[in-house]
Image (cartoon, grey):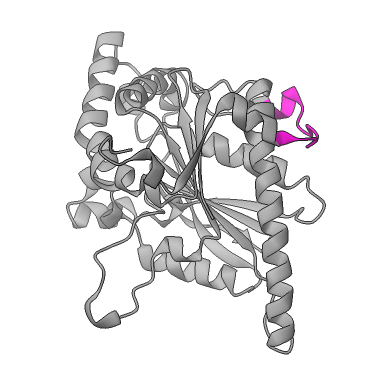
Amino acid sequence: MDKKTPIQFSPYRFFTKAQWAKLRADTPLTLSNEELEKLQGLNENVEMDEVRQIYLPLSRLLNFYVASCQSLHRATHNFLGGRDKKCPYIIGLAGSVAVGKSTTGRILQALLARWPNHPKVDLVPTDGFLYSNKWLEAEGLMERKGFPESYNVAGVLKFLSDVKAGRSSVEAPVYSHIAYDVLEGERITVDQPDILIVEGLNVLQTGRAPKGGKLIPYVSDYFDFSIYLDADADVIERWYVERFFQLRETAFQNPKSYFHRYATLNDEETRKTATQIWRTINLPNLEENILPTRHRADLILRKGETHDITEVELRKL
């Protein structure tokens, strides 16, 4: 937060980890250690205590919100004479590269699906809506991959509009981190879930307000709740570099990997390459496009140096 902004004017309630953990109440732990391990990404080690202290209270809060939204939808359904369809609850999840969005999304998906009133929970990354490498190369945008202009925003809006309208079998494109490209012909099908989690770098971004009251929809317009995963930029850089080292020993070894050329780098070369990619692409994107959207989120999860969530900010209603 801007240090010049008086804390009493903040639209958020602030919680330490201990304060937030108390809000779990009697929410049962429905995740096993084996399941938790499978949900985690590279270079992350989410402990079960973190699930108990952070994710279970969040799961409880979202269960309340979803139930209220379902009740409101039933009222609207009656008002409209039964003409509207099932309306999924959509959660947006934003944050930098390497901050842990995918792991957070998978843990939330697993926990939310175990509540009886919303058992069907889907997770869709917006990576699939990146333009193809062929298109980006033709437009001179390969070095801007991940920036707002590298996404098919109209495609994201069409997808979310169809999901929110209750349409069945809505398809989203699939992205491969091995190929570093959208997979032609591959699709994720979303079929009227109770909850949809949409995860991506720029999902909370807006543009300049139009003149004359013209309608310009933003991705976040379709969100019922939004989460921003936050950490200091220098800490995220370290995580990015550490992950790059791990990828050098794993995914980059695959001859089909777009980054296979990095598999034979020595440690010094690996650190130099990862740092250069971070500072020329990912850091500018974070500073220019992602971080400015942080306070558009309903919930901010603040991470410490070891990936553990240390603070929670919840927007006041």
Specify the principal SS of the magenta part.
Answer: loop
Q: Quadrant of residue 105?
A: top right
Q: Residue at x 71, y 35 (%)?
A: 24
Q: Is residue 261 left or right of residue 27?
A: left
Q: Nearer the viewer, residue 79 or 4?
A: 4
Extreme residue in the left direction: 140
Tell whether position 29 is magenta. yes
Residue located 63% across and 37% down the image: 107
Is residue 172 highlighted in magenta? no
Q: Does residue 38 appear in this view?
A: no
Magenta range is 24-36
The answer to whether residue 108 of the structure is visible from this angle is yes
Query: From this viewpoint, which residue is outermost toward the top?
Result: 267
In percent of width and height, residue 271 lies at 28, 16
The image shows residue 138, relative to residue 311, as above or below, that is: below
Q: Position of residue 15 (x, y in %)?
A: 54, 33
